[in-house]
Image (cartoon, rainbow, N blue to C red):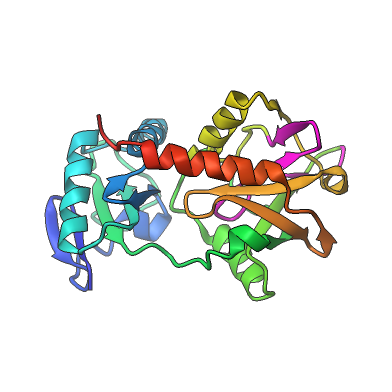
């Protein structure tokens, strides 16, 4: 049992809290985010909140709390749940209907949830040995630049790869040229061709916070960055395939399907630099 925050109240996680006609439940009409709790600090909290606010404005969902309030609630929950390492989960929905109806009005009171939970466990050896990913078609909607709660295609992709012993999906769409990489079910990808980092450009994919920070670190290291569509046929030319996420940090990929890649120095250097950046970060200034 965890203590959680729902609409101004702290409850235990087994208490009924979300109403049946909440639009987040019946329509996926909502947003979410996940922030790392490290040594009592919420890493890059401000970046995550600003992104969430932009998405809320885009969809016309009221954003009920400011950065300081979210931070204070999170700190209270982390203490009540006795956690210094973990994950802060935020969820914002448009609110509750009187009856289930696709059409929404403009005067809802939003539903806001805040949870601090233990970090999902990963074998620390994975950063040393690398991981395998599998190709999977990107079956999602056209709002992927926003972190919406409509995650069924992501869930299906993640189940597909985990049931086959792989770590993550490498999702793709198609254009007139061929199949091109979008992102993972819960991650981003970058590639190193031996001279520069190539990152799928932000076109209906999430501008991930870890992605933003890692590309900034790469520029600080004087590594050239190119953002463009990366086609599946190009992958065999890449020296390194690298996965990025809040949980996975900077993770070397050693297999895409059965094609093998070396665990290179770029992923290692970027992961060390990213861990240093996280360690030096203060969640709220």
> Which part of the image, by quadrant, shows the N terminus?
bottom left
In this view of the protein, can residue 66 be seen by the observer?
A: no
In the rendered image, the vertical position of residue 249 relative to residue 57, given as above or below: below
The stretch of residues the image draws in magenta is 177-200
**Which quadrant of the structure image shows residue 218?**
top right
Horizontal and vertical percent for residue 107? 23, 37
Q: Residue at horizontal 62%, vertical 71%? A: 162
Q: Is residue 191 highlighted in magenta?
A: yes
Q: Is residue 273 highlighted in magenta?
A: no
> Which part of the image, by quadrant, shows the C terminus?
top left
- Front one among 69 and 62: 69
- Front one among 76 and 6: 76
Q: Is residue 246 left or right of residue 67?
A: right
Q: Residue at horizontal 50%, vertical 57%? A: 151
**Which quadrant of the structure image shows residue 42?**
top left
Q: Residue at horizontal 63%, vertical 33%? A: 203
Q: Is residue 167 left or right of residue 115?
A: right
Q: Is residue 259 left or right of residue 18?
A: right
């Amino acid at each position: 049992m965890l203590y959680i925050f729902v609409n101004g109240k702290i409850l235990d996680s087994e208490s009924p809290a979300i109403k049946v006609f909440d639009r987040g439940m019946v329509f996926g009409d909502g947003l979410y985010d996940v922030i790392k709790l490290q040594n009592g600090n919420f890493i890059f909290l401000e970046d995550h909140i600003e992104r969430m606010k932009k998405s809320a404005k885009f969809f016309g969902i009221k954003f009920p709390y400011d950065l300081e309030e979210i931070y204070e609630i999170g700190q209270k929950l982390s203490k009540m749940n006795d956690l210094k390492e973990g994950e802060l989960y935020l969820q914002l929905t448009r609110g509750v209907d009187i009856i289930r109806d696709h059409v929404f009005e403009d005067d809802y009171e939003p539903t806001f949830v805040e949870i601090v939970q233990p970090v999902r466990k990963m074998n620390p050896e994975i950063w040393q040995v690398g991981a395998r990913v599998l190709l999977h078609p990107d079956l999602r909607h056209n709002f992927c630049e926003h972190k919406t709660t409509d995650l069924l295609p992501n869930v299906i992709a993640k189940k597909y790869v985990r049931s086959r012993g792989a770590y993550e999906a490498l999702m793709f769409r198609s254009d007139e040229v061929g199949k091109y990489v979008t992102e993972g079910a819960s991650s981003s990808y970058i590639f190193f061709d031996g001279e520069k980092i190539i990152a799928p450009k932000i076109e209906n994919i999430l501008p991930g916070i870890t992605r933003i920070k890692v590309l900034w670190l790469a520029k600080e290291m004087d590594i050239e960055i190119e953002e463009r569509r990366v086609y599946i046929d190009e992958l065999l030319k890449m020296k390194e395939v690298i996965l990025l996420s809040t949980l996975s940090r900077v993770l070397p990929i050693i297999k895409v399907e059965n094609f093998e890649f070396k665990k290179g120095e770029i992923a290692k250097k970027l992961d060390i630099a990213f861990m240093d950046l996280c360690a030096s970060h203060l969640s709220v200034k």
